[in-house]
Image (spheres, rainbow, N blue to C red):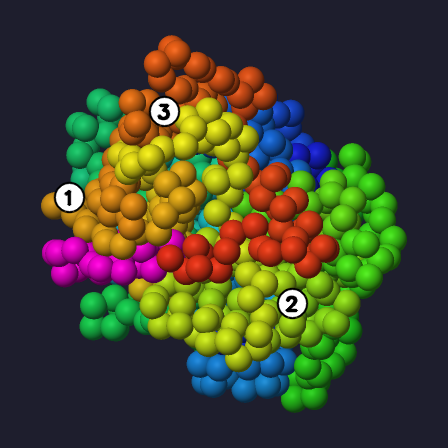
Amino acid sequence: MKQVAQNYRSGELTVLDVPVPSCKPGGVLVRSLFSLISTGTEMMKVTEARLSLLGKARARPDQVKKVLDSMAQQGPVATYKKAINTLDSYTPLGYSLCGVVVEVGAGAEEFAVGDLVAAAGNEFALHAELNWVPRNLCVRVPDGVAPEHAAFATVGAIAMQGVRRSEPQLGELACVIGLGLIGQLVVRLLVASGVRVVGVDTVPARCAMAEEAGAIASGTPDGEGGVALERAIAAATGGLGADHVFLAAGGDSNGPVELAARIARDRARVVDIGKTKLDLPWNAYYEKELDVRFSRSYGPGRYDDRYELEGVDYPAGYVRWTERRNLECFLQLLAAGSVDVGPLVSGTHPIADAESVYGQLRDGSLKGIGFLFEYPEAADQAPAAAAPATAHTRTVAAPRTAGTSQRTGTGTDSGTVRLGFIGAGAYASSMLLPHLAKLPAATLGTVATTRSLSAVNAQRKFGFRALTTDASSVLEDPAIDAVFVVTRHHSHADFVCRALEAGKAVFVEKPLALTAEQVDRVLETVDRTGNDRVMVGFNRRFAPLFTDLRRRFGPTAGPVSVRYLVNAGELSSGSWYLNEEQEGSRFLGEGGHFIDTVGAWIGSAPVEVTAFQTGDGADLQATLRYADGSLATLTYATDGNARFPKETMDVSGAGRNARLDNFTRATVWSRSGKDVKRSYAGQDKGQRAEVAAFVEAVRTGAPMPIGLDSLVSTTLATIAVEESLTSGGPVKL
């Protein structure tokens, strides 16, 4: 299928041929009829992508801080590679469309194949022929609403949420500053609500459009136009000033904020909907005690994964207007004729012409407010006869990226291992695939991702021979020798079992499982199939500084004491790690790394775990007792300084001490003195050696690099930490 995408590093904007997304539970697969270009949000993104790296940094200072924090913890080399990997990827455009349902996932049975729907979301309602959309971001289109008008529903919901934030009342006067697409919709919604409206924009044609929609006056903000506007507002309000001011403008000028202060009445509400400079003039806003409010996207539910992805609705008695209800309300206004978006359609273009359309919008040769992409094959198809989409897999003649070698042959019979990947997110793309792509013994076969562009990015960078959005295509392919599972935590155990049942070797990123029951299922599958070819991504035991430090420390006749400090740091508010109900706790997902590293040092299995956490539950400390009498204390802290090293391990025993400082420096203290080694090339946490060892074991049939008993022991010890926190006492293993 066709999809519009942009490379944020190079600025390249193109229409790609990508696999059709699979229809997952909780949503529907929608064949697009029309998708709306957001001339504000999207063009800002398109413009940023064409900036230099320095220009991008200036445009996104929030991201610069993250990069600096990462450099302090991981070093410049690792940070640079990670940043470039993120930038040098295709990203989607679009977030508002109308289309026809062609497939219904489990849990979304309120929809039926053939339904005409409007869809929202910058991860779901994309400029693509087909999109999977979760149920709470999808609504039926009422009879009588043209599909091209229904495609405005998302931006209509954005405007509606802004109006709701201001709480206008009949007869009041509102001023809308910025009469682009959102501003024009705000004008129409306010007029429909019985509110008098004055519009402000630097483009006279937009002012005229606002007046045609019902604004009592409009004009430019400067010079005589600005004076006339202020007089009109004063005349309409008896000198009081505007009851509400909506900032729907963009750009770096502070003019809209200053104008709002001049025209607003005492204690008026100022609502920011767009993305404009907000350097509030303190005296002006203080003296009038202006109420400044922000409007966040489509409404309550936005950025809440439980609402958007899991379909958990908010009770109307507590949250009357969610983003889905805003979408429905806007469509109902269109159906009733209370709002007309027809005059906002400035042009409709085939999706194949997207590159040209964005170019003309960027250089100003294409003028207007609302532009639509049309999908002619879908438009010619009657909704009731909409055909399901089945092209989830695409085979390509994969070009090799710079620095990789072209290989021939398939599977172990020809001396190479053919790999399949399920998941190709940030970690897989930066920490695993770059190493695998350079291994002569490995051939990258098929990559499966839930998002179409993720598969395209993986193929483009690493040379996969086929890409798909159907994980079963990887698991059922007889040519695949080994499967890498690099997905979200809740899916690991299931994919491992399915891969083993298919006769594959499997490499799964930590954790192997989230519960003891899932561990039992993996072991039952191993027993039933006789296939124990499992490897978990416990990479730290393969780190060069760690293995060398263990060698220099030497053998010990008795137990040792280990102290491991993890300065994990805070998670961003949108991180999927925060969904503990589905993905398990943060420690459950990551803690196995550190328990495995300690176990690799000691060479013995833990037999007892006791854990405590701080009052707020943010930090924890676990003590592990091992069969040989060794003790390990693991501190997992989330509220430390972001630039303090992430990991520090200290070992004491047999008259010696060892310290591993964040995989950049390793020191041994012994009777012969102090011996220090450093990694001058930056952090190496062992991923290169780890994947090489796994591929070689698969190729030769040798034992897995980490024994299954050890993998299970580490996983159960990690789970035991959670059990100890709950019970308040020790847990024996």
Nearer the observer: mark 1 or 2; the answer is 2
Q: CA distance from mark 1 to mark 3?
A: 28 Å
Type of secondary structure dominating the magenta stretch: helix
Provide the residue designation for mark 3: 658
Residue indicated by mark 2? 504
Residue 521 versus residue 331: which sits nearer the camera?
Answer: 521
Query: How busy is the neighbourhood of tag 2: few (under 14 within 10 Å), some, or many (20 plus)?
Result: many
Left or right of residue 368, residue 307 in this image: left
Inter-mark Cα distance, 1 to 2: 43 Å
Near-viewer residue (250 or 287): 250
Q: Residues within 10 Å of mark 3 (few under 14, many from 20)?
A: many
Kind of residue sitting beneath label 3: Ala
Horizontal and vertical percent for residue 638?
28, 39
Asked if labels 3 and 2 touch by Cβ distance under 8 angstroms, the answer is: no
Q: Quadrant of the C terminus?
A: bottom left
Q: Amino acid at mark 2?
A: Lys
What's the magenta region? 714-733
* Image coords of residue 302 (percent x, y): 38, 57
Whichever of callouts 1 and 2 sits on the residue coming sooner in the sequence is 2
Helix, strand or loop at mark 1: loop
Say which residue appears at 46% left-offset and 24% top-offset.
Answer: 552
| In magenta segment, residue 726 | yes
Q: Position of residue 60 (x, y in %)?
A: 49, 31
- In the rendered image, the vertical position of residue 63 relative to residue 323, given as above or below: above
- 696 versus 110 height, above or below: above
| First-in-chain label (1 vs 3) | 1
Instruction: Say which residue label 1 marks.
Output: 614
